[in-house]
Amino acid sequence: MLTCYRARRRLGAYLDGGLSEGDARWIGRHVDACAGCRAEIEQFRRVKALVAEAGAVPEPDWSGFFPGIVRGIDDARHRAPEPAPRRGGLRWPGWAMGGVAVAAAALTLIFWPGTRGPAPAEAGVLVTSAESDHPGATVMVYAPPARDMAVVWVFDTD
């Protein structure tokens, strides 16, 4: 399996004659012994023949390639450098990001769920409070929903 993977990566170069002598012999022996790689190389041969019949692939013209690279390097050497970014004055993006950071910190401190009041004792427990007719007393009713029971507290500050 690994041998097929290594061979299939080189089948195109094998058909084009681009492998070293030792690699070409190794691929040739593998293709003779492996039916899957032999089928794949036959597909490559058919595609190569169809392209050759169509004549759609002209030989590339490389005559201007390297002179173009040299010309691009020379042009870059003679080009004036771009001006450096201005320093000084107010830097609005920096101020804006600083303001956003300060606002986020302030909002975090304001809305952070710290130790604000007691945590509920049980989920689903209903606790209500009400004022009584007595001016200094407070009534609190505790009623857990799972039981038919209610606890009433009366607090008197007098």
Image: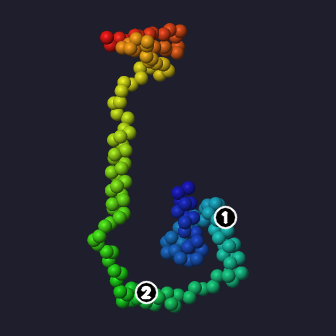
Residue 44's x, y, as percent? Answer: 65, 70
Horizontal placement of 96 versus 130: left or right? left
Q: Are marks 1 and 2 in contact (CB under 8 Å)?
A: no
Which tag is nearer the camera, tag 1 or tag 2?
2
Which one is in front, 120 or 128?
Answer: 128
The residue that appears at 49% across and 87% down in the rendered structure is 65
Residue 72 disc label = 2
Q: Quadrant of the C terminus?
A: top left
How packed mark 2 is, by other alpha carbons closer than 10 Å (few <14, some 14-19, many 20 or more), is few
Residue 49's x, y, as percent? Answer: 69, 77
Residue position marked by numbered label 1 in the rendering: 39
Residue 11's x, y, as percent? Answer: 58, 69
Query: Which element type, helix, strand or loop, lies under badge 2?
Result: helix
Q: Quadrant of residue 85?
A: bottom left
The residue that appears at 32% across and 77% down in the rendered structure is 84
The residue that appears at 44% across and 10% down in the rendered structure is 152
Which one is in front, 148 or 57?
Answer: 148
Residue type at mark 1 is: Ala
Mark before the other along the chain sequence, 1 or 2:
1
Which one is in front, 81 or 157?
Answer: 157
Residue type at mark 2 is: Gly
Residue 72 visible within the image: yes
Q: Quadrant of residue 120?
A: top left
Q: Quadrant of the N terminus?
A: bottom right
User: Tell me, what colour scheme is on the image?
Assistant: rainbow
Question: How far is disc 1 from disc 2 in space, using C-alphas?
Answer: 46 Å
The residue that appears at 47% across and 22% down in the rendered structure is 123
Horizontal placement of 129 versus 26: left or right? left
How packed mark 1 is, by other alpha carbons closer than 10 Å (few <14, some 14-19, many 20 or more), is few
Residue 19 disc label = none
Which one is in front, 34 or 107?
Answer: 107
Residue 122's x, y, as percent? Answer: 44, 20
